[in-house]
Image (cartoon, rainbow, N blue to C red):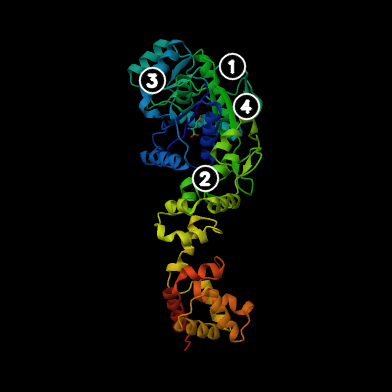
Amino acid sequence: MVKVRFAPSPTGYLHVGNTRTALANYLFARKEGGVFVLRVEDTDVERSEAAYEAALLEDLRWLGIAWDEGPYRQSDRTDIYRAHIETLLEKGLAYKCFCSKERLEEMRKQAQDKGEPPKYDGTCRDLDPDAVRDLEKAGAPYVVRFRAFKKVIRVRDLIHGEIQFPADHVDDFILLKQELTPSYNFAVTVDDMLMGITHVIRGADHISNTPKQIMLFQAFGQEPPRYAHHSLLTGHDQKPLSKRHGATHVREFRDMGILRQALTNYVGILGRNVPREIMDEEELIETFSLSSLSPSDSLFDLEKLVWFNKEYIRKLPTDSILLEMGLPAAYRDKIALLQENARTLGEIRQFLDIFEGTGIEEEGSAYLSEAKNLSAVVASLDDALKDGVMSFDEILKKLEGTGLKKREFFMTLRVVCTGRKNGPPLKDVFPLIGRDMITRRVSWVKTRFSLP
Ligand code: GLU
């Protein structure tokens, strides 16, 4: 049976790139009738925070990415990793290394100067067992390193195809850090092995870790899982997606008023060959396959996400939008009108000031200050309100009766009535604004522009 995992590190908020990993695992598990595990990788004690873990879970729940097992937390599994370290030490496949931080730092610098990746030089690889015992007795700090195999590693990646790593790619990397917590590569391998993970689906930034993990599987005499490394996301400049490109965290999108359906739909089809763009969860699952994922980087386009959002806002029942926005049923007609054209829920919220705001927003006010027909429009509107006329057609007739041209006065009328230069069709929004609000705006405009 297929078993996959999403293994975020709680060192920040859920990023859209990581969301893609989560979603790919989730869709694959659902498609294959498999199990989706959530595992929190908090071995980096300094950077991991409980608050980020809580936020990750909250964001996944909000997205509707439901896990079947977990969340497991690596910090709860320290004993398991230590026991597995012992196994490798006993088998002679790992060794204790007493090299000082300074020496390692020096080596790293030298490699850097030569433009080479830093590699451990194997100084402690063959220390005499007595020397090791003495050092330990003396309380010398140590790490445990893997006695890496010097052999070529081949992986048949389910997205990238065959990848080959040369025999010297993997050095004697650290398994257990000085504070006796496991390294990322060690904890991941032990967990993937014990949890029976069949497919590792993650970002291409982990490709270079894969040979290390495969070697560890071999060291434990186990078959490694299949690997599928999806491409990474970029901005319009083709650089890796980062803060510089704007919003990148799920909660930033949520705060902007992006619907979860739009975000999962867009992220769920990024870099994929799909029969159509708009797909609900069922269709996303149905059409999912690892081979439909492109090995090349994918553009994350906020405008495109907003396009999806607009589609979903329009399609969703008004009651769902009310629920999303925490608004009572009294707003139904207003929201039904605004959802026709809104790009985000945030925009809907802004446009609600048509019905609730006082006065005129800045852009509208700037328009009115230039509008030659303002006093005529205001006077007619004032008259109409006094006469108790509230039908939009009648008000139009009244204005046209003054000799004003509809085309010319329409924007002025819109701004005076709604407080904005743009919004839903005036004839639709007008009846929802209500006499009181329009009367208030008219007197606001009169005071502001010193009209009689
Ligand atoms: N914890 C790793 C990360 O957040 C993921 C490790 C993996 O998927 O193997 O990048």
SS for dot 3: helix
Q: CA distance from mark 2 to mark 3?
A: 39 Å
Give the structural element (helix, strand or loop) at label 1: loop
Using the numbered discs, state the Cα–Cα distance from disc 3 to disc 4 in whole angstroms.
Answer: 30 Å
Q: Residue at x 42, y 51 (%)?
A: 323
Residue at screen point 37% across, 41% down: 51
Question: Which element type, helix, strand or loop, lies under badge 4?
Answer: loop
Q: Which residue is mark 2?
A: 261
Q: Secondary structure at mark 2?
A: helix
Splitting the image into 4 quarters, where does residue 298 fall? top right
Q: Tag 4 or tag 1, which sits nearer the N-term?
A: 1
Residue 150 marker:
1
| Disc nearer the start of the sequence (3/4) | 3
Q: Position of residue 66 (x, y in %)?
A: 45, 35
Figure quadrant of residue 212: top right
Question: Gap between marks 4 and 2, in whole Å?
Answer: 27 Å
The type of residue carrying mark 2 is Gln
Locate residue 407: give its quadrant.
Answer: bottom right
Amino acid marked by disc 4? Leu
In this rendering, the label closer to the viewer, 1 or 4: 4
Could you say which disc has been placed on residue 80 in the image?
Answer: 3
Q: Nearer the viewer, residue 277 or 427?
A: 427
User: Contact (CB < 8 A) between labels 4 and 2?
Assistant: no
Dot 4 corresponds to which residue?
A: 158
Circles 2 and 3, Cβ within 8 Å, touching? The answer is no
